[in-house]
Amino acid sequence: MSVAAKRATKPKLVVFTSSLSGQCRRVEGYLAQVLQRRHNHETFRLVTVDEGDRPDLVQRFGITDVPTLIVVQGRTERARLERPRGCREIEELLSPWLR
């Protein structure tokens, strides 16, 4: 399979965040722990969206609170988690894709 084909089939993990939020920074740390612990750095195409920079995407995805994590596979939203409080919640959200 070509690199372009792998990239097209790899699910996107979209992280809606705010540069002004301490909770968002904590969640980024939790997410890094989950992916590192399970050796899944290459599982997702990670896309970080700052709500202040991309209000169009915030509206399109119906984001009401940050941080919000969304797994998009193909053109379909497969999973969503608003305001995760720790590694366990993130791991549960991502478990269908983690090794």
Image (cartoon, grey):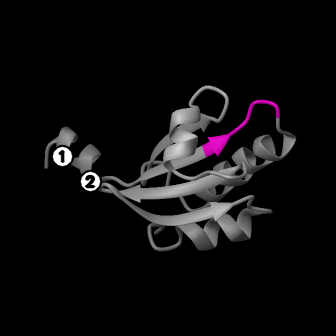
Comparing 58 with 16, the one in front is 58
- Separation of disc 1 and disc 2 at Cα? 6 Å
Residue 43 is situated, as x and y percent measured from the top left of the image, at: 42, 54
Given the image, on which type of amino acid does mark 2 rest? Answer: Thr
Residue 28 is situated, as x and y percent measured from the top left of the image, at: 70, 45
Judge the density around disc 2: few (<14), some (14-19), many (≥20) Cα neighbours within 10 Å: few
Residue at the image position 83 percent from the left and 47 percent from the top: 23
In this image, 54 relative to 20: left or right?
A: left
Magenta stretch, main secondary structure class? loop
Q: Quadrant of residue 16?
A: top right
Q: Quadrant of residue 87?
A: bottom right
Location of residue 99 with respect to 42 vertically, above or below = below
Q: Which mark is residue 5?
A: 1
Comparing 48 with 96, the one in front is 48
Residue 72 is situated, as x and y percent measured from the top left of the image, at: 41, 56
Callout 1: SS: helix
* Residue ranking furthest to the left: 1
In this image, 94 relative to 12: left or right?
A: right
Given the image, on which type of amino acid does mark 1 rest? Answer: Ala
* Residue ranking furthest to the top: 53
In this image, 8 relative to 86: left or right?
A: left
Comparing 12 with 52, the one in front is 52
Q: Which residues are magenta?
A: 16-20
> Where does label 2 land, which residue?
9
Q: Is residue 18 magenta?
A: yes
Location of residue 58 with respect to 52 vertically, above or below = below
Location of residue 52 with respect to 58 vertically, above or below = above
Callout 2: SS: helix
